[in-house]
């Protein structure tokens, strides 16, 4: 490729969109251009740089090393230009802050509390990108991420919001069903168990491990329902369709509101189930976004809200030792 002395900066937007989507078609739709126009922009950059930026495969695009390097710079530059444009338009203009997190954290914890942030910071608009896929904060233009990880893998410069414990939860109506008692763990044989299939490698969220910790390896429930998303499983629990393993304090609001209850009462020295979660939720700012006031305000609000929520957390008892069976 013949190298040009001057880099045509007007072609960066097309390249950045194509690299972010790994698709010329999606980039063209985003920028209201034709696919061939995006292709020409990318080719113009490649000619100016003298290296290919994409590996063009059948129905697929992949970034080369040079393309990945340029994408990081282009994303930062375009973000800075957008921030500057917002400042020029006026300090009163709303600022958009993009947050990524898991679907369960977004629907069960963040969104119900988001109004409090908007009331405190009305000039900041928030965009929630809820996905169970790990997003690239730079490439996907994310400002703040809430990650679910063990402490050893927590992002650098992150702020821990809260850890996690596990306890069975169900609807109040299910607990009042006298035909199917639910007083000790062995009573789960009368009920449908709800399972979340999304979180591999998390044994503390699996019924088999929880039951084994109480000597109930052979327990056969009345049935099983499985879900690909944790928030869907919790909705089924609130509807009285079965018993779920609740993640605390993720569900503290629903417990305080009486939508979910812990069926088992503590009776002298409850024990913690084996496989208790060693993960926690962490908030982290994207590179280049940590110095922004709205990003700092949002992470501080997350930490303050998590602390206040933990202080008012409802007491969820663990099953009594007297309800535990030992295998012979």
Image: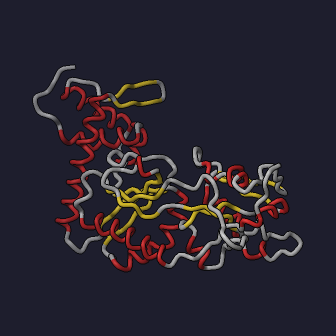
Across the whole image, how many numbered discs are drawn on residues? 0
Q: Where is residue 324 shown, x and y percent of the image?
A: 76, 61
Of the pair 189 and 317, the residue shown nearer to us: 317
Task: Indicate the quadrant where residue 39 lies.
Answer: top left
Quadrant (top left, top right, bottom left, bottom right) of the N terminus:
top left
Quarter where residue 170 is shown: bottom right
Image coordinates of residue 291 in percent, x first then y, are 22, 60
Give the residue furthest to the top: 1
x, y (%) of residue 322?
76, 67
* Percent x, y of residue 3: 16, 24
Which residue is more in the foreground, 242 or 129? 242
* Left or right: where 287 falls relative to 154: left
Q: Residue at x 15, y 34 (%)?
A: 7
Kindly indicate the quadrant of the structure image that contains residue 272.
bottom right
In this image, 65 relative to 151: left or right?
left
Residue at coordinates 20% horizontally, 54% vertically from top-left? 81
- The front one of 40 and 165 is 165
Is 286 drawn above or below residue 187 in the view shown?
A: above
Q: How is the image coloured?
A: secondary structure
Q: Residue furthest left?
A: 5
Determine whether, in the image, residue 51 is placed left or right of residue 245: left
Residue found at the far right of this picture = 179
Q: Residue at x 72, y 57 (%)?
A: 214
Identify whether 109 is placed above or below 275: below
Residue at point 32%, 37% (across, down): 37
Q: Is residue 138 above or below residue 183?
A: above
């Amino acid at each position: 490729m013949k190298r040009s002395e001057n880099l045509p900066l007007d072609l960066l937007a097309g390249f950045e969109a194509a690299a972010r989507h790994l698709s010329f078609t999606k980039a063209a739709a985003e920028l209201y251009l034709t696919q061939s126009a995006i292709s020409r922009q990318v080719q113009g950059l490649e000619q100016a740089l003298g290296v290919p930026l994409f590996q063009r495969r059948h129905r697929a695009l992949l970034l080369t090393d040079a393309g990945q390097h340029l994408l990081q710079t282009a994303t930062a530059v375009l973000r800075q230009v957008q921030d500057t444009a917002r400042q020029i338009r006026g300090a009163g203009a709303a600022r958009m802050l993009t947050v990524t997190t898991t679907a369960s954290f977004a629907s069960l914890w963040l969104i119900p509390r988001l109004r409090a942030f908007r009331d405190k910071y009305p000039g900041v608009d928030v965009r929630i990108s809820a996905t169970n896929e790990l997003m690239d904060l730079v490439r996907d233009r994310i400002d703040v991420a809430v990650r679910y990880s063990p402490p050893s893998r927590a992002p650098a410069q992150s702020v821990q919001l809260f850890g996690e414990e596990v306890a069975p939860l169900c609807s109040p109506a299910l607990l009042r069903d006298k035909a199917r008692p639910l007083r000790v763990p062995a009573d789960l044989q009368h009920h449908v168990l709800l399972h979340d299939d999304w979180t591999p490698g998390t044994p503390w969220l699996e019924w088999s491990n929880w039951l084994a910790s109480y000597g109930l390896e052979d327990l056969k429930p009345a049935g099983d329902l499985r879900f690909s998303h944790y928030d869907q499983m919790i909705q089924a629990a609130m509807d009285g369709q079965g018993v779920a393993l609740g993640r605390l304090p993720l569900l503290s609001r629903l417990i305080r509101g009486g939508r979910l209850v812990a069926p088992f009462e503590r009776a002298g020295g409850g024990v913690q189930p084996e496989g208790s979660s060693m993960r926690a939720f962490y908030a982290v700012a994207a590179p280049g976004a940590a110095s922004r006031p709205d990003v700092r305000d949002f992470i501080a609000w997350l930490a303050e809200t998590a602390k206040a929520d933990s202080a008012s957390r409802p007491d969820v008892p663990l099953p009594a030792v007297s309800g535990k069976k030992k295998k012979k």
